Amino acid sequence: MVSIALFGAGRIGQVHADNLLSIPDITLSALADPVASEARESLLARSGASLREPEAIFSDPDIDAYVIASPTDTHARFLHLAARTGKPVFCEKPVSLEFAQVVETARIIQHAGSPVMLGFQRRYDPEFMQLRQSIASGEAGRAQHIVMHTRDPAPPPLAYIQSSGGLFRDQAIHDFDMTRYLLDEEIVSVSATGACLIDPAIGAAGDIDTAMITLRASSGRLVQMINARHAAFGYDQRLEVVCERAVFTIRNHPATQIVRADAQGFLTAPPVSNFITRFASAYRAEMKAFHAMIVSGVKPLATMQDGVEAQRLAEAALLSMQENRPVSVRELG
Amino acid sequence: MVSIALFGAGRIGQVHADNLLSIPDITLSALADPVASEARESLLARSGASLREPEAIFSDPDIDAYVIASPTDTHARFLHLAARTGKPVFCEKPVSLEFAQVVETARIIQHAGSPVMLGFQRRYDPEFMQLRQSIASGEAGRAQHIVMHTRDPAPPPLAYIQSSGGLFRDQAIHDFDMTRYLLDEEIVSVSATGACLIDPAIGAAGDIDTAMITLRASSGRLVQMINARHAAFGYDQRLEVVCERAVFTIRNHPATQIVRADAQGFLTAPPVSNFITRFASAYRAEMKAFHAMIVSGVKPLATMQDGVEAQRLAEAALLSMQENRPVSVRELG
Amino acid sequence: MVSIALFGAGRIGQVHADNLLSIPDITLSALADPVASEARESLLARSGASLREPEAIFSDPDIDAYVIASPTDTHARFLHLAARTGKPVFCEKPVSLEFAQVVETARIIQHAGSPVMLGFQRRYDPEFMQLRQSIASGEAGRAQHIVMHTRDPAPPPLAYIQSSGGLFRDQAIHDFDMTRYLLDEEIVSVSATGACLIDPAIGAAGDIDTAMITLRASSGRLVQMINARHAAFGYDQRLEVVCERAVFTIRNHPATQIVRADAQGFLTAPPVSNFITRFASAYRAEMKAFHAMIVSGVKPLATMQDGVEAQRLAEAALLSMQENRPVSVRELG
Amino acid sequence: MVSIALFGAGRIGQVHADNLLSIPDITLSALADPVASEARESLLARSGASLREPEAIFSDPDIDAYVIASPTDTHARFLHLAARTGKPVFCEKPVSLEFAQVVETARIIQHAGSPVMLGFQRRYDPEFMQLRQSIASGEAGRAQHIVMHTRDPAPPPLAYIQSSGGLFRDQAIHDFDMTRYLLDEEIVSVSATGACLIDPAIGAAGDIDTAMITLRASSGRLVQMINARHAAFGYDQRLEVVCERAVFTIRNHPATQIVRADAQGFLTAPPVSNFITRFASAYRAEMKAFHAMIVSGVKPLATMQDGVEAQRLAEAALLSMQENRPVSVRELG
């Protein structure tokens, strides 16, 4: 049995916990979460884990691996502590809202040689995996450009917005990562336009709620991202990849297959409600892959370096918007 | 130039007239319609045709062909008169509501050797033609069974119902014909169940408004028809053909490609409003084919005999419903 | 904790076991299955259940309820044994292939007063439940007719066909049940047409592989069923309910939301592969409902009587096909 | 009868001619086209027009209006000649590939007071018209951002590319215009990224084949354009408008409603083949509107000034790409 410690019993921590519990070979033995809550107690009850302090967890030789799903501002510290043990770590993104700290943490991890999987769950989504494979196979010729739509069902609470690092670092980060995952090459320049069109309170908090981001890859290929904090029909996460001989699309996942037809037309269901439901199978596959990484050393699809690169693009987008000019990614170090 | 005489300036007569006028080689030289109406005057004005009596038309040597789109109870008489001239005739279905008269008229026509095209326009619909070709090619293996849906956007006026011959002879006739067209073989037995579920007035008039009809072809293959006088979303005319290695479907034609999405879901347009709009290109192709029949003797896709056979199935369905038993088509002579 | 004994470690037994294990309040304490297999051992290992004889299970006072997922020919006997205990039972359909035995077993159960839930899982499918609610609410007016398609991805093995009781009792039984569930009224007559069009071996085994079945409800409303043992694109389970002011459709569930578009057109995914995947959430809800029945006495959506009535319709369909005539359901006792 | 002279018997001239001929009140009396061709002779034959020199046409008092569909480099001269007559003119876009000449011609036309309709046919497309009306009605709240896709089924011939003025002025011009039409406000800044990813020959000719263009309207609203010279599935012209309470999409128009389903999935038809077929009804409506402008003075939906503004955006996009920076539209005069 593999003994795992979990940091954080919040929404995403609960998702990881349940996915870990469904793997027969895994025991969730410890949970670190300083805030008492019904969710925390429920997790303790159903997992049999004991509530412990982070320091105690990192010094416990019986724990085999760590899953970090605590608030962002704790990630770097926990990663540093984990690095000293050399044990496998799964860490939710982002590593830090400070890009310099992300780079520094990646350096420490690399030096320590710890195996780290980063929480870019879309890389484990069956449809994204199949799409990546289709592109890589070349069966449809070369991928020429990509268009991605990501819109939230509703803006997050203002308090979240204020501590999120902004739309580029918080929401668009997954799309930046997908770009590199699907094209399998680095982005060299970023041109971002942002606006506050949905809720003036977001603008007052110094953030934007709508962004158009154009990326150019090192081979010249283009990616267009459309990001917004709201879509009237709910969670919108689509993308299309234009290849020489085919165009691949991943559509939204409808909540049901019921159609209601009347004189107004045919009404089909809105998408599943949020990224947790949309990517449920990706989250499951992610924990299975983490297990495979622990027991067999299988390399993860998302590494610390992927986190660094995605965040570099977010920083470049922010700079591009602030200075109203295309930004070369090399400017970000 | 081919000189054509048209009988009937009603809805379908107008459709044929406009399609004839769009063929450069055709002149619409005469119109017979005893009832003065704005529609008749408009047709005379835009076609340059002169209003004449049927007898005068049939004795005019300068007229090359006839298009009969007058009320059903005149079809047989006009066909008989046309037969004497030996000139090409297009006649709307049905030839008569009396099956015996249909058979007799077919016999007369055959004896006269007149080339007659019958108004089963679906046979000229580009999608039905392509589907028939797909089936006949055998690329998907043998067709095993067919399911057809035909629902009107709304029941016709009660006066129409009363003189229509009933749902089987009036509406379902096109589906009976499609069965033979697509399977390219004869039907040997019919089992029909009818009900009045939409409007009690239809039942009071002695007709049904909903029917389920099961057909068995001579090779044993099955066809299921679903017919109704109403669908809340409008004109519903779909069909699926289950072959060994593929299932072919012809879907409804949406009126627009606009989608409106909100928290309720995705609302797409209802189908085009009725059979005239749905089969507009079929009607155009039909008149082009009639022209080809006149000038080059190209055999029509729908003959008098097709009219006889489709109506025989309607009679069999009626008998099946009345006697609450499957009916062998041979019983109908 | 509720202690449950499971009979049968086959495909459907495994599904029920996993769904039971995911309910925190339930322990799977005993398994009866006389045939050693890897699947049986795996189930024993992951559930912690002990392998026992049926008789021992039925006499064990510590077991709270029974889940019967063993071969059909054992259902009646296990139900009789369970009835003596008065404890809650879940039993897969059909109760027996012999209609008389179904009726007799239902009588025994009723006399014993045992709470029995029957395995018509579609009644617990979220989409079917929502559809039933939409119909019952009357918001779209009265339901007038229903069209159901059920086609298997491929015919079952011939050995299965031979012991299945035939297409009506085996496959169409779910559709017969859905009819009663959705219309919430009894069927009074059945007209069935069958054919062997897919695989001659099925015909040689005395069964059909394609059927068109027309049902008339006591209020006169119609249901059309289209059933086949094969669809080239995979598992096909759709239905449409025509109401006065709306038409409701439940479409197939696509396996993915990936679209591949090229000069041939847009290729979307086939449906999920079989009824086990299509109705996965229905099976989960079913076991949750069984738990609610055990602990709170919540009435099941599918009772022994529902099993009797669905099977009566299957018997009527068989008789209709054999005697080539519509059959009044009252003829079946 | 309204007597119209047509300039140009090429592809789009033929479309306009047939649409004019279908309007009963219109006579196509003169055609100017210096290049003998089968198409020109066919048009003369079916329209009854006489072949004449432009100068003779502009001095003929019996001609009521002009339709200019000749090569782009003749537009300005013909517009200048037409302006002297004060008669109504329809002119295909663009007025000129030289922006200064467009501005100058618009000034001349305005001074002359000639009524001019410009050939932005999408403004007359029933779906775009309905969409504009939906936005303007405010029923779904304010439009926040727009995403447009325009991809050609295949790159035009290289000779065309070389004289086209480039992707921005040639293809994207319609999208620039749609932006202003749908948002009903001016664009203030343009940020364009271009690349040659489809055919190196296009790059060698000094053009791009793929572009991502971000526009900001004066109120701050954003528009994202995705333009390419190729899509594997054919002509791709879609757009979505994100409003506060709804998202409107205009999808491609499938060539047929036939679906072929097999183990690979469901294959639906590619879009209609090109902009001529996609916008057939828009072209018809355009000529009807031109007729209404001639006889009743109805203002056109597309004016010379709309041509100037769309082209200004094309120039801004070109400058943005060339100088790798966002461009303020005011820079373009």
Image (spheres, coloured by chain):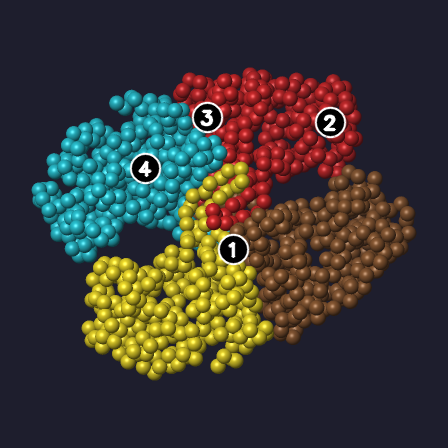
Chain colours: A red, B yellow, C brown, D cyan
Of labels 1 and 2, the one closer to you: 2
Give the percent coordinates (x, y) of residue A301.
60, 33
Q: Amino acid at mark 1?
A: Ala
Q: Position of residue C305 (x, y in %)?
A: 75, 58
Q: CA distance from mark 3 to mark 4?
A: 25 Å
> Residue D237 at what x, y percent from top left?
38, 42
Question: At label 3, which amino acid type do we have?
Answer: Leu
Q: Which residue is mark 2?
A: A38
Q: Quadrant of residue D167?
A: top left
Residue sitting nearer the eye, C303 or A222: C303
Q: Secondary structure at mark 2?
A: helix
Q: Which residue is mark 3?
A: A197
How far separated are the C-alphas under marks 2 and 3? 37 Å
Residue marked by disc 1: D261
Mark 1 to mark 4 CA distance (whole Å): 36 Å
Residue pictured at 46% horizontal, 54% vertical: B234
Q: Which mark is residue D174?
A: 4
